[in-house]
Image: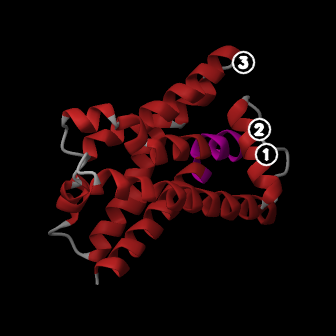
Amino acid sequence: MKETFLNLINYLKNPVLEKDSNTTLKYRFKIFFHLLIISIITGIIIAPFFAILEELQLVNMENHKIEAMFKDMGVLQIIALAAILVPIIEEAIFRAPITAFKKPLYFKVAFYSFALLFGFVHISNFDITTNVLLLSPLLVLPQILLGGYLGYIRVRFGIQWSMLLHGTYNCILILLSMLVES
């Protein structure tokens, strides 16, 4: 786990277009689960900042548009949408194109740009206010970081792995939020 984390950090500091030469499924699933745990821990570490922003009445987290969208859906519909359909679409838009940039500088710019775009697209989940716009880098920080993690696995293992990681991550968050609400 520590090795995966250090490899991820080093990669995020200097992303390169290079596939992982180890193609065994056991190895790839090990890295996949490490990245999933890292993604979840990242969200847990950042979450208290959202509580502080809400406590200071700077952002209303109750009006999150995802909750409103899921309000009239059943559990299977929510999981199908958030854990299957949305990850496939978002990965096709935000991760698939990055490997088209072959020159190292262009690749690096594309990698970071797509991670940032992925993050900032999620600002639309909030009611847009001045505070939300000013705090947007913090509000979408989990998605920006996740965009980097998904970019890492996409480049190293392929687009299907970023789709799987994205879908699994979303599914876990949905199931946890349903447990908290019940």
Q: Is residue 125 above or below residue 32?
A: above
Along the line of sight, which residue is nearer the eye, 94 or 117? 117
Part of the protein shown in magenta: 150-161
- Identity, as a three-letter code, of the amino acid under mark 3: Pro
Between the residue at mark 1 and the residue at mark 3, the CA separation in whole angstroms equals 18 Å
Helix or strand or loop: what does disc 3 sit on?
Answer: helix
Helix or strand or loop: what does disc 2 sit on?
Answer: helix
On residue 7, the disc is 1
- Place of residue 14 in the rendered image (x, y in percent of width and height, measured from the top left): 73, 29
Badge 1 vs badge 3, beta-carbon distance below 8 Å: no
Instruction: State the residue position of label 3.
Output: 104
Residue at the (66%, 47%) spot, across then down: 153
Packing grade of label 1 (10 A; few <14, some 14-19, many >=20) is few
Packing grade of label 3 (10 A; few <14, some 14-19, many >=20) is few
Q: Nearer the viewer, mark 2 or mark 3?
A: 2
Badge 1 vs badge 2, beta-carbon distance below 8 Å: yes
Instruction: State the residue position of label 2.
Output: 10
- Identity, as a three-letter code, of the amino acid under mark 2: Asn
Residue at the (56%, 55%) spot, across then down: 42
Helix or strand or loop: what does disc 1 sit on?
Answer: helix
- Identity, as a three-letter code, of the amino acid under mark 1: Asn
On residue 68, the disc is none
- Place of residue 181 in the rendered image (x, y in percent of width and height, measured from the top left): 29, 78
Left or right of 98: which side holds 13?
right
| The stretch drawn in magenta includes residue 154 | yes
Left or right of 180: which side holds 46?
right
| The stretch drawn in magenta includes residue 10 | no
Q: Residue furthest left?
A: 72
Along the line of sight, which residue is nearer the eye, 39 or 170? 39
